[in-house]
Amino acid sequence: MTLLETERVAVSPLRRGTPPRRRARGRAGYYFVAGYAVLLLAFGIVPTAYSFWLAFTNDQGQFTGLNQFVKVVQDYRVGPAFAHMLVYLVLWLVALVVLVVLTAVILRSRVRPATSALFRFLYYIPGALAGVASVLVWLFMLDPDVSPVSWLLKSLGMQTFAAVLAPGNLPLILMLIAFWTGAGGWMVVMYGALNNIPDEVLEAARMDGAGPWRTAWHIQIPMIRQWIVYMTIMAFATGTQLFVEPQLLQTASLGRVSPTWSPNQLAYVYAFQQGDFNGAAAISVVLLAVGLLAAGLLVARSNLFKLDES
């Protein structure tokens, strides 16, 4: 055996194997994922499977097919609850997509980098508040007796707190609460997505005579379309789970707001006031199906997970 062949035999096992440092990094990744997988299993998959089991059985554990869904659909409170949620979702999603993207584009193109950092921090502050805290802030803002914008409320004919919380005003009020709490974080995300657009592309658009708005409409927004779709899916899922805000408004208004205003509130009444966990599970399964259907349509229409061709 020649010296060269001896060196090949000695080195080849090391070449075929994975370096120890790389193996350690690979194991560390599995450890991080394992923590999330355990939480997902414990608080996501198992509860969802249990909800499906409850939705298709009765309180004796006997399989009843679609009986629970039929019972829920025949409830006179279901129609108004889902109608309220639909109106709220339309207002919430339109305001979120239009205003967040518009603000991010303006922030990216019109504000200096140092100043934009300050704006992004200010936008994010409301998102640091929990849902309960944000509702309490808005209870103060919506009471004409103590609100700093009481002049505006009274000029709109809302002289009392009860008038502000009239049923027709609730979708708009809940949209304002949700927007104030969640829009700032999405503005930061959209701003980061806009920063990933190469400067050469924007410079080429300017050289072709495109102004700021044409550049935004024809270049920037299409190039961050996947992020906009992702934001819409997450916002839709959050909107269908509306519970804390109307529940606190119902308590603060001393019953002027319906305790079954949203589907989640109705499910809560089914479970903890009527003791009907099977009916509550049926409502939760319907909400899950609505969310999955909407997400599937958006993903399919937008090619959200399509890999960029190199």
Image (cartoon, grey):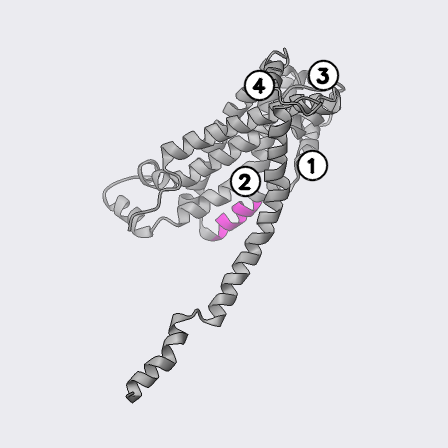
Cα separation between marks 2 and 4: 42 Å
Q: Residue at x 41, y 44 (%)?
A: 110
Where residue 2 sits, quadrant-wise, is: bottom left
Q: Residue at x 58, y 20 (%)?
A: 65
Between circles 3 and 2, the one closer to the viewer is: 3
Numbered disc 4: secondary structure? loop
Marker disc for residue 256: 3
Cα separation between marks 1 and 2: 16 Å
Q: Residue beneath label 1, please?
A: 133
Judge whether residue 289 can be spotted in this image: yes
Between circles 3 and 4, the one closer to the viewer is: 4
Q: Residue at x 36, y 37 (%)?
A: 303
Viewer-proximal residue among 293 and 60: 60
Q: Which amino acid lies under the numbered mark 2 shown in the image of this protein?
A: Gly
Q: Which residues are magenta?
A: 114-122
Are the residues at dot 3 and dot 4 in contact (C-beta closer than 8 Å)? no
Viewer-proximal residue among 212 and 151: 212
199 lies left or right of 272? left
Q: Tell me residue 254's x, y (percent).
A: 76, 19
Are the residues at dot 4 and dot 1 in contact (C-beta closer than 8 Å)? no
Q: Residue beneath label 4, please?
A: 66
Q: Residue beneath label 2, please?
A: 184
Q: Residue at x 60, y 36 (%)?
A: 181
Are the residues at dot 1 and dot 3 in contact (C-beta closer than 8 Å)? no
Are the residues at dot 3 and dot 2 in contact (C-beta closer than 8 Å)? no
Quick one: label 1 or label 2, which is nearer the N terminus? 1
Cα separation between marks 3 and 2: 31 Å
